[in-house]
Amino acid sequence: GQWGLAEGEALFTAEEYKFYGDVIERIRRTVGAENGLDEGFPVFTAPTFITRIKYDADWRPRSMHDVYWLPHVDKNNTGHYDYSGLLYLSTHGSDFLGSMFEFVSLSDEETAEQRVEPRRGRLVSFTAGNENPHRLNIIEGGTRFVLSFWFSCDREKEFRTFLDGKSHTSFDAHRPDEL
């Protein structure tokens, strides 16, 4: 099966799904408070994922999605993203080299306006629009892990059944406890 699991075998335990969901909820509340949003905003929106970038001198991108080092604006990729963020799970200098996160100018994508040095446990959150173009430098050694997530101010884009152990292909109309 997918991920090398036997048919019906869960990728994570219920406790692990709950922990992951609790982390996302704590981040969501922090983003809302730091940006002066009303209670309940922003809402969590799909996807979220843990990314592993491992240095390999022979690796070459196979698709445009593999070219992670190009400057971009998250809201231009997905229109309902209002806030973007990263929770670092590894530390620059001890776990990996290179792969620094940088904010750049749309008029000068070569010069970093601000650089974030990844450190395990560091939370980086920013508005997802044209005011925050950014990029990730190419990894030069080791392995980098980060939890990436996005939030929206559009309640219709809220992803409510996140981490229930099932596969989902669309946003949900109701919370499970409202059915």
Image (cartoon, rainbow, N blue to C red):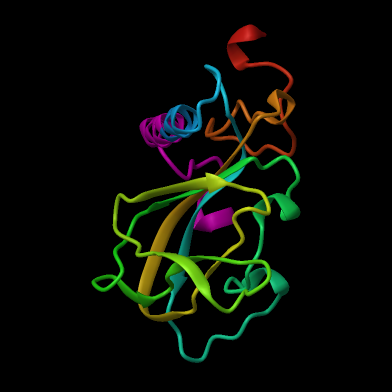
Magenta region, residue range: 1-26
The answer to whether residue 7 is seen in the rendering is: no
Q: Is residue 65 magenta?
A: no
Q: Position of residue 35 (x, y in %)?
A: 50, 32
Location of the C terminus by quadrant is top right
Q: Residue at x 39, y 67 (%)?
A: 144
Q: Residue at x 40, y 30 (%)?
A: 26
Horizontal side of residue 47 vs 139, given as left or right? right
Residue found at the very far top of the displayed protein: 178
Image: 120 above or below 28: below
Image: 63 above or below 132: below
The answer to whether residue 127 is seen in the rendering is: yes
Horizontal side of residue 133 vs 25, given as left or right? right
Q: Quadrant of residue 106?
A: bottom right
Residue found at the very far left of the displayed protein: 94
Q: Position of residue 156 (x, y in %)?
A: 74, 25
Q: How many marks?
A: 0
Nearest to the observer: residue 110 or residue 161: 110
Q: Position of residue 19 (x, y in %)?
A: 37, 33
